Image: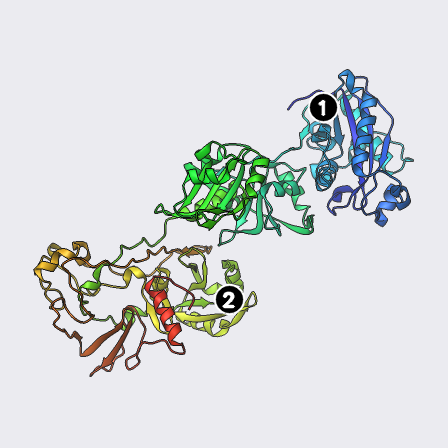
Amino acid sequence: MTVNPEYLVLLFTTTSGASGDLLGSDEKEIIQLVWQVLNLGNKTTGAVNEVLVKPESVELTEDCREASGLSEEALSAAAPLEQALSQFNERLQSEISTSSGNSFCLCTDGQLHLRQVLHPEASSKNIPLPECFFSFFDLRKEFKKHVPSAADLKDLDLKFMTDYLNVKVDSVNNFTALKIQQMSSIALALVSEPVCQLFSCPEKVNEKFETGTCSKMERIDDNTVIRARGLPWQSSDQDVARFFRGLNIAKGGAALCLNAQGRRNGEALVRFESEEHRDLALQRHKHHMGSRYIEVYKATGEDFLKIAGGTSNEVAKFLSRENQVIVRMRGLPFTATAEQVLQFFAPSCPVTDGTEGILFVRFPDGRPTGDAFVLFSCDEYAENALKKHKEILGKRYIELFKSTAAEVQQVLNRYSSVPLIPVAPSPILPLVAQPAFVPPTIAAIHGTRDCLRLRGLPYDATVQDILLFLGEYTADIKPHGVHMVLNQQGRPSGDAFIQMRSVERAHATAQRCHKRSMKERYVEVFACSAQEMNVVLMGGSLSRSGLSPPPCKLRRLSPASYSFPPAGAVLPAGAVLPTGAVLPVEAAGLYPSQFLLSPRPMAPATFYPANNQMYINYTAYYPRVMGNLEPIPGSMGHKAGYPLDGVPIHHRAQSHTQSHTHPHTHSYTTDTLDMPISLPCMSLDWGRKMEYPEETPAARGKHANSAHTGQRGEN
């Protein structure tokens, strides 16, 4: 924006704390406003004006007393900030005669006086500022335009500029009067011959934070992003923008972070318009939002994109309506419709654009999650909507929260991600006799125990926490070798797997790190194989009772070692099953042919190419809950171990017998074998029956039910 003001108002502020380059960094209050008017037309200056300000805490530091010459007694008789600003505005307008159409603009020594002192304090005290405080000239930047090579902008100060321009100033004046005279002398030197510089492009201070969207393909400068930590859980993006009032946040640049449960974790990533404003934001480290202090750290553009970036056209269209207030609904009935949501909020808080202003959150397969986002055109409607918190819709109470565009992106990104393991079809094979199979060897199941299993991790543990927990053994982790296990809701299960470089290092790590503490919890560390790790990451479980395969691997018609001829993959009616059992002709049509195909082999061990960095590998599994099978007319029931015709069949393989006592509990007895073997769903030695040691019958039933429904659980 280009302006040509007729007057410059040279403004200088003093706080009860630090001064100079640290002004405003200690969150101290303003105690003095000093200004002088410069007429750019006739190159003349007015008188130096001063207004004292009474702070809420009348305590001055020793440096402040010496520099300003002020005392607590003088400040106690002064007016508070709001009245002092009114006096400033009235005296300024009378001196400049703004009623006659004269224009003016503020000019300060650097950015701190307005951005770090006046705007933050006025915001915290809910004091509205006059329009003139939202644009100003930075005297240091104007000097830099005249002499670009004189010095770095951060090294400039009033003394350097007066010496460079050969300006004489009476040093007899007190601290603030001296600063104002130095500023006016520098400004006069810049606008006079031979420089003749024009003050035409003032700095702007954003009055309001603008919401917006951010694409994952956008490039963001790492030097413009910070991470704020310690926010109240109920804070919104507007509250974050208010904390950084005076600094220009980019459009849609305040993104609140969510934890694994989809709730705010007290952190936010903020993107500023420039590196200069980012550096000023870092000076607000441990400033207060209400009664809480906020920590401010550097962050990267990649961090911001992970939180606020999105690629969904549906979300982009939903968030394209600017200046809208977003409310998040949680706990909706799965059958809820947009019309029911509109009726829920009507008539006191109409939704923007009707059904177009409602966005339902769904899983990748289209199932509703019970969450939705709703747009309102103003804060008044949004506040009325929030009053309906925990009111009933259908048969459920609805939770309502003020939300942000970044939260919409995060929630949609979390739920729209496709699971790494596809959902398997519901098996309908219990009516078919289970054929015997040849169990694979020990090496096929266990393999080399060069991996670690961590159990009992805190649910908020990160990869960095795990690396700190392992300490010196971190150097032995393979690239991309840390795998966090999530449960079926996409939340941390408290387990993790780590791929080590060798069996020896895995064993040593397990011995030294077992039951060490992480965040007030002790963590168990065990050595395991890559095969066991893969089974758990696919949705199975690993406990003291052995391996339980994922739900999609629970029942198989044929053993993994059995291969069908390519041309005869589908068994015709009357064909002989692998175990010798004959499928009756009248029952052959009851079972789809795709379930008689050769099963797919187990996935190979996870392998990641070498790299210099380690990234987190999350594995999410979305099981489908099996419904009860309805009886099919004309079919017959049977017991495990019996074919459809009711004749008992005893399956034997390599001189051992198998008896089924539970769908997921098997026992084995030996005849003549001496070598131990293991099955794909367990890790046992011969002579030991698979059971649940040290558990009550109720606990065993709970464990079996958890495995039956495909839940991982915590072992």
Q: Secondary structure beneath disc 2? A: helix
Q: Quadrant of residue 184?
A: top right
Q: Secondary structure beneath disc 1? A: loop
Residue positioned 40% across, 76% down in the render? 695
- Density class for disc 1 (Cα within 10 Å; few <14, some 14-19, many ≥20) is many
Q: Where is mark 1, residue-wise?
A: 199
First in residue order: circle 1 vs circle 2? 1
Residue positioned 51% across, 44% down in the render? 328
Disc 1 from disc 2: Cα separation: 60 Å
Q: Where is mark 2, residue-wise?
A: 470
- Compared with residue 274, is residue 302 higher up or lower down, i.e. above or below? below
- Compared with residue 602, is residue 182 higher up or lower down, i.e. above or below? above
Note whether residue 152 is visible. no
Residue type (three-letter) at the residue carrying disc 2: Leu
Residue 112 x/y as whole percent: 73, 38
40 displayed left or right of 77: left
- For the C terminus, the quadrant is bottom left
Residue 681 x/y as whole percent: 30, 68
Residue type (three-letter) at the residue carrying disc 1: Phe
